[in-house]
Amino acid sequence: MKKTVLACVMAGAIVGAGALASCSSSPQESTPAASGPAKVAPPAILQAGTLKICAPNDGTPPNVYHAETGALVGIEVDRGKAIAAQLGLKPDFVESAFSAVIPTLQAKQCDVIMAQLYIKPEREKVVDFVPYVYSGTGIALSKAKPADITGLDDSLCGKKVIVAVATTAEALSQEQSDKCTAAGKQGVDITRNSHADVSIQQVQNGQVDAYLDTAETLGYYATKTGAQIQMAGQPFGTIKIGAATLKGNTELHNAIAQALAELEGNGTYAKIIGEWGQADLSIQK
């Protein structure tokens, strides 16, 4: 919780006092009512009437974190609540370290993982996935004076960018810089900083032309903190993320897939990802 309060204070410093209030809680902090009778029951779930959701909390928005009120919030929390309600169940979030999330599911301490879990072949050997969103890298520009950058392309040649250390964004920026120099153009001037709030402040101040980070992080700052940034082009380097259930738990897997399809159909899915600045990462594309 302390990490989240600090993150909110730092985010508020980017854009002024008004931003801090918007960082304090999720727009869907309350739990939506279950839609009808329970659609799954034990043994497909551990406890009748409840969907136990493994949701690792590293204290960092936008996935799963604690608001200043102490409430568990984040896009995964909103999404988990919506799916549980669609299944006619009450959500119960089981917090754990991200590294332990699959073992926690296998130990039958939760029914499903919702944790920005990338769908990778090695994971598909031990869990079944229902894809629900993409993860990707994005480029943030100043909203007031946007640099002439269109995406991960030659428009970055000669530009000053800031990236987080040891991230996909850093690697992709260096690859693009190498392409620029190979084509006889000026390389990308890359600065590294692991604090998103500092990086966004530099973009807003015109100290750098762009900030590269996960599209999820950039969407959070753009929608929840009032940061004056806009995205250049579409997210790139995307990978699917999904809800993970125990291998062979077909009943729950199929029920979650159906619930997600219904949420997509009734507009709830689009509303949630839009509120967290992730519309460009929609699985409906």
Image (cartoon, grey):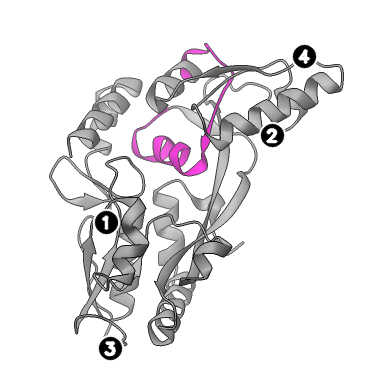
Q: Distance between the Cα atoms at labels 3 and 1?
A: 30 Å
| Type of amino acid at the residue the image marks with label 3 | Pro
Dot 3 alpha-carbon crowd within 10 angstroms: few under 14, some 14 to 19, many 20 or more: few
- Quick one: 13 or 266, which is closer to the camera? 13
Task: Say whether marks 4 and 2 touch (CB < 8 Å).
Answer: no
Highlighted range, magenta = 204-227
Sequence-first disc among 2 and 3? 3
* Tag 4 and tag 1, C-beta contact below 8 Å: no
Real-space Cα distance between discs 4 and 2? 15 Å
Which residue occupies the extreme right position in the image? Answer: 183
Mark 4 closeness class: few <14, some 14–19, many ≥20 residues within 10 Å: some
- Residue 28 — which label? 1
The residue that disc 2 covers is 152
The quadrant in which the C terminus is found is bottom right
Q: Circle 2 sits in a helix, a strand or a loop, which is it?
A: loop
The mark lying in front, picked from 4 and 1, is: 4
Mark 3 near mark 4, Cβ–Cβ under 8 Å?
A: no
Residue to which mark 4 is pinned = 186
